Amino acid sequence: MAEFEIQPLGPFSLAAAQDFAGGFAPGIGGGSVGTTSIAMAFPIEGTDVSAAVDLRQRDDGVVVGRTDAPSAFVDRVRRQAARSLSIDHDGTDWPRVGERDAVIGRLQKAHDFMRPVCFYSAYEAATSFVIGQRISMRQSAVIKRRLSEQLGDQPTVDGQSFAAFPRPTRLLELTTAAGLNEKKISWLHGIGRAAMDGVIDTERLRALGREEALATLRALPGVGEFTAEAVWLRGCGVADDVPSSEETSLRAARDMYARPDMTRAELLELAEAWRPYRMWATVLLRVGWGREFGRRSYRQ
């Protein structure tokens, strides 16, 4: 078993991440949320291997990971886990957003400067959103779990196994599944092939930038404008961007800022104070809104 360390820059609480992830563990992929740790299980990007990793935080703030993955892949596992927890970004100036915006500042203090917990990769995000089209989140979670059990690997941490979502090569073996029609299966095959070809490698999409990445994602079967943006924001772990058309963030802002007539243009103007963490602030706002106003919390 290999161990590695991640030193978060800026305030970070794994307990806050556990609280965030605990509400939708099936949404982000395989693994589990425990009382003191988060376990992740996922296909390792750029390989045909899956890995599981257990993450804990020491008193000095360092996040320690343990994995049974082969040594050649440990650095990839580390990078993927860090990206999922948003600790691949420098969050040193994250508290300053709260100093400029009292609503965000209050939420930061209430939620231990929570950062988004993201999908393990753009591949997992794209497959999740395609599976979830026109069905409930509960149904989507059941389908993903069944696919993991049917075609996914069972990577381990210290001998304990966790079901991972199928690697792209295994996803191409899918011919039938309860809850998935032929069209969705065809779309999933297309996404799997794009992942195998490196087209939707997460770091590649990040390097392309927003517009080119969105164009790449829209070219995937079953992926339209809304889904492409969701994959970009939640699958690539982007820190400084805002949804362009999604309505729930606007409703959350209207309630949290007591501005029932706020327009999207006014929200974008408000979000200028959140740079360079506009997506972090958007997610935090959604989480706070869900818990304080009894709305659906931010999940996917």
Image: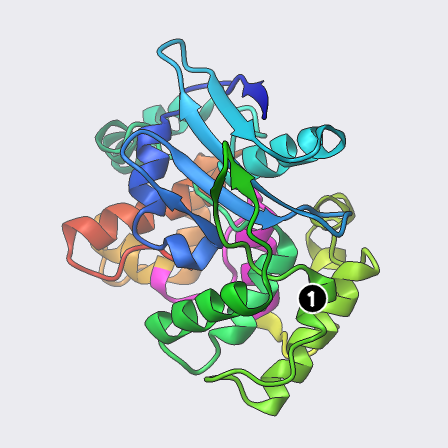
237 above or below 171? above
Extent of the magenta region: 227-248
Q: Residues within 10 Å of mark 1 (few under 14, many from 20)?
A: some
Q: Secondary structure at mark 1?
A: helix
* 247 within the magenta span: yes
Q: From the image, tell me which residue sits under label 1.
A: 170
12 above or below 252? above
Q: Is residue 91 shown to the viewer in this render?
A: no
Residue 104 at x, y percent in the picture: 31, 36
Taking the image as shown, residue 121 lies to the left or right of residue 106, namely: right
Q: Along the line of sight, which residue is nearer the eye, 252 or 55?
A: 55
Q: How many marks?
A: 1
Residue 86 at x, y percent in the picture: 51, 35
Residue sitting farthest toward the bottom: 182
Taking the image as shown, residue 168 lies to the left or right of residue 144, namely: right
Residue drawn at 74 percent across, 57 percent down: 200
Residue drawn at 45 percent across, 65 percent down: 145
* 245 within the magenta span: yes
Q: Quadrant of residue 255?
A: bottom left
Residue drawn at 62 percent across, 75 percent down: 224
Picture quarter with the C terminus: bottom left
Picture quarter with the N terminus: top right
Residue 18 at x, y percent in the picture: 33, 38
Residue drawn at 63 percent across, 79 percent down: 222
Residue 259 at x, y percent in the picture: 23, 55
Q: Is residue 277 shown to the viewer in this render?
A: yes
